[in-house]
Image (tube, coloured by chain):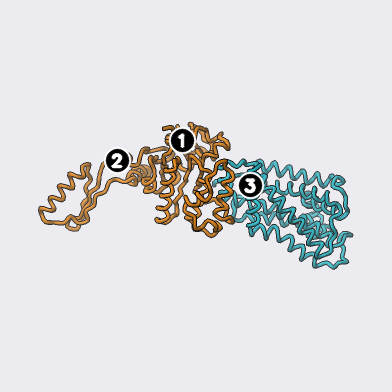
Chain colours: A cyan, B orange
Amino acid sequence: MKVFTHELRGELLLYSRSRELAFFTFMLPLIFFVLLGSVYGSGDKINGYRAADYLLTGMIGYGLIATAFAGLAIVLVIRRETGVLKRLRATPLPPPVYIAAVLLTTLIAFALEAACLIALGMILFNASFPKAPGSLVVALALGGACFAALGVAITGFIRRSEGASAVINAIYLPVAFISGAFFSQQHFPEVLRRVADVLPLTYFIDLVGDVTLKGTPIWSEPKDVAVILVWGIAGTLLALRYFRWVPRED
Amino acid sequence: MSSAVIVDGLEKSYNGLEALRGVSFEIAQGQIFGLLGPNGAGKTTTVEILEGYRERDGGSVTVLGEDPSSAGLDWRQRIGVVLQSSSVYDSLTVTENLELFAGYYTRPRPVAEVVELVGLEEKRESRVRSLSGGQRRRLDLGLALVGDPELVFLDEPTTGFDPEARRRAWQTIASLRDLGKTILLTTHYLEEAERLADRVAVVRDGEIVALGPPSELTSTLPATEVRYRRNGLEVVLQTEEPTKLLHELTSEALAAGQELEGLEVRRASLEDVYLALTKEEQE
């Protein structure tokens, strides 16, 4: 436990020092929220909800995939390719403790991100406070765990640190788009809607919408929860199979 | 004295290619052991098997009394590793890096002491990003030492250093011996091995082709070279009896009232042994 808190403190320090993470994965969702939110007037509605409230749910989804998936994956690829992970393997730090500290840091960053988005929405756009806050916390934790597992899994498929951000951006930005993080999927062509129907972020944004806008408790949305869980379990299995501590040799 | 490392008949293949073909050596506690050889000879493969990164195909390996392929975290308390490339956190300071790693060990060496040992006092509060290549390597060494290990693996620790930095690193490594550490040093700088190592092994094509103290290895090449110029032509003589030869040459020259221009006496160095051993490979 002592070594866990030590490592967690180290990871939080590393996170706070990383300019790349601070901007691309933490600031960008906040910036997009401000930009998109400014487009709509206070009386505008999307899908029957106040525009700011509706946008907020999408932005929490975007924040999730940016911090828990993209940010985590980029950090791990860089650490693997620079030999930091390899060096850690030669120390007595237990690997599960290390992974737990990295994942918890990611979840803390995402929790902070979600809190900032909600606060920003309320301050700038007069958005409403989430109607079922308890369920929202559970939904965020579930989404965080699922996307962090997928983030760890994807590192196994990226060969080097140069280009890691490019590959990850090429995955997560389209996924965020198609999943309706930036606007309603209502007017999407059939094909895109089909794709969206299998993506976990679609269900996460839907779930966040249900608990924040409608105030539905999370247990009334078993389908959303189930799809996110299945993706999370698949991500965990892939991560266990493909995660590497040392760079691949060519 | 007991052995810190015992390697016997070590074998390893990659995709049917034999990288190690029966490598055997022992390292006594408190010794600096140099592993020499050209790139691709099998140095890093050997070291990474000893560090527990790679599985061996054959032979036996004991490091600090345990088999590295199954050794646990307690064993890792007792080793320190410097990898071939620098691996530290760029965004942290020197002290922060050391403190983070110190926290992994049950009995770490005080961080301030490690900073001093690797000569980074002036950079202790600097972010790693701002350090020179040589300073980063010294921090690498510091991270390997912060757990106060019994055995330290140094994989080409001075590659890319300027001569001044290399000399300082040698002092640091020599001071580790004074602390009673056992050190396995791989290098392709002959001078480094000659200067630091108590014993060396020359590896070529996955086999050890020479093993022993540097002085013993150099004595396998018998000749001492005597060079001078006569009438502008260089004369090179090889002898087993340099004293006698020199006496004859100099008395002759004195009698004739001549100077032996460019007179030079050179003992075989480890480099000569190394070149002789590795040249056979190319033929």
Is the same chain shared between marks 2 and 3?
Answer: no
Locate residue B236, reporting x and y percent.
22, 50
Task: Say if residue B113 shows up in the picture.
Answer: yes
SS for callout 2: loop
Question: Is the residue B66 above or below the residue A166 in the image?
Answer: above
Please name which of the two marks, 2 or 3, marks the residue nearer to the observer: 3
Badge 3: how crowded within 10 Å, few (<14), some, or many (20+)? some
Disc 3 residue type (three-letter): His
Label annotation for residue A6: 3
In which quadrant is the N terminus of chain B drawn? top left
Please name which of the two marks, 1 or 3, marks the residue nearer to the observer: 3
Disc 2 residue type (three-letter): Ser
Check disc 1 and report the residue beneath it: B5
SS for callout 1: strand
- The Cα atoms of the two marked residues, 1 and 2, are separated by 26 Å
- The Cα atoms of the two marked residues, 2 and 3, are separated by 53 Å
Check disc 2 and report the residue beneath it: B219
> Looking at the image, which is closer to me, A82 or A171?
A82
